[in-house]
């Protein structure tokens, strides 16, 4: 009984500690979002809505370099925070996460989208798709690339996936406008196409493949499902993980307490 009561108290204590750490990480995440919003307000005009995302994409493209950011939050596997990318630059994934959080700071929803090579399985490039209500638009912060629709608005991932010519025509136009010395000339048209573009790599595991087939049965295209936002920002991911750990410890604390009480009642019945 004493062991069960001690275990219950320990689990409760660990639950409280995990919750406090989760809150600290979440506050730090929200502080970063507020800082990114201040960057937008200070450097980017917010008057051209809904094209504001294009201006932010252009700013991220110009900010710092394109090498993989060496920094990370807590663990190397978590990668850099958007603020670290803001200060030192980063590759396509790093800059896309920064762009996504900057959009988040002004209330624009978005998701990371991964492009795949000709085999449809090898990840080659990462971009962002703005998803603000019925408004979908692709933004590539590594090549300063968006896809205006001549009839108004912009093209989204589904448009580019269904019509590969949209990418090729846009690249040709920008190459003519910017010249061969611009980074757009280095775009890999074969490997970085949108033919297999998807926010989630459904071929990564058998379980994901099964899930995509189940979604297809109910007439849902798995390639259109957005990635959970908390997976992209290291601080938000740690905050959510710690919250889950806190709940698990709390459940075990409750279970151990119930077992201790049951054991105590049983002992009272046996021993007069």
Image (cartoon, helix red, strand yellow):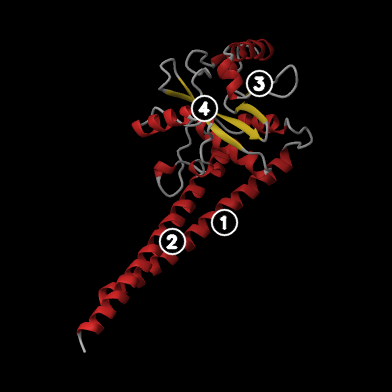
Identify the mark nearer the N-term, 2 or 1.
Answer: 2
Look at the image and tell me in which quarter the C terminus lies: bottom left
Mark 3 lies on a secondary structure that is: loop
| Sequence-first tag of 1 and 4 | 1
Is there CB contact under 8 Å for labels 2 and 4? no
Location of mark 1 (residue):
27
Residue 240 lies, in percent from the top left, at 48, 52
Q: CA distance from mark 2 to mark 4?
A: 37 Å
Label ID, residue 18: 2
Query: Quick one: label 4, few (<14), some, or many (20+) residues within 10 Å?
Result: few
Question: Residue 194, how many percent across, how many down?
Answer: 53, 19
Mark 2 or 4, closer to the camera? 4
Query: Helix or strand or loop: what does disc 1 sit on?
Result: helix
Q: CA distance from mark 3 to mark 4?
A: 22 Å
Residue 260 or 198: which is nearer the viewer?
Answer: 260
Of the two numbered discs 1 and 4 in the rendering, the one whose residue sits closer to the viewer: 4
154 over 97 or under it: above or below: above
Which residue is drawn at the image coordinates 49% and 20% (left, top)?
196
Quadrant assignment, res 159: top right
* Quadrant showing the N terminus: bottom left
Mark in front: 3 vs 4: 4
Mark 3–mark 1 distance (CA, rounded to whole Å): 35 Å
Q: Which mark is residue 221?
A: 4
Q: Earlier in the sequence, mark 3 or mark 2?
A: 2
| Distance between the alpha carbons at the discs numbered 2 and 1 | 14 Å
* Residue at left offset 42%, top offset 33%: 211
């Amino acid at each position: 009984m004493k062991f069960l009561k001690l275990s219950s108290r320990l689990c409760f204590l660990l639950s409280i500690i995990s919750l406090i750490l989760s809150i600290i990480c979440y506050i730090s995440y929200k502080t970063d979002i507020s800082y990114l919003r201040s960057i937008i307000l200070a450097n980017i005009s917010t008057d051209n809505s809904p094209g504001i995302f294009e201006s932010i994409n252009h700013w991220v493209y110009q900010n710092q370099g394109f090498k993989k950011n060496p920094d990370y939050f807590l663990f190397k596997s978590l990668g850099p925070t958007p603020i670290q990318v803001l200060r030192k630059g980063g590759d396509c994934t790093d800059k896309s996460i920064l762009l996504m959080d900057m959009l988040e700071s002004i209330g624009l929803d978005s998701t990371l989208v991964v492009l795949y090579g000709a085999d449809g399985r090898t990840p080659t490039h990462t971009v962002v798709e703005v998803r603000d209500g019925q408004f979908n638009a692709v933004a590539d912060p590594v090549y300063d690339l968006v896809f205006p629709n001549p009839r108004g608005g912009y093209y989204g991932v589904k448009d580019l996936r269904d019509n590969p010519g949209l990418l090729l025509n846009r690249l040709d136009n920008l190459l003519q406008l910017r010249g061969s010395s611009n980074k757009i000339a280095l775009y890999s048209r074969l490997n970085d196409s949108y033919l297999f573009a998807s926010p989630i790599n459904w071929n990564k595991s058998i379980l994901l493949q099964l899930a995509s087939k189940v979604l297809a049965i109910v007439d849902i295209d798995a390639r259109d499902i957005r990635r959970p936002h908390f997976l992209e920002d290291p601080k938000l991911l740690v905050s959510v993980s710690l919250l889950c750990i806190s709940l698990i410890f709390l459940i075990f604390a409750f279970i151990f307490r119930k077992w201790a009480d049951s054991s105590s009642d049983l002992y009272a019945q046996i021993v007069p």
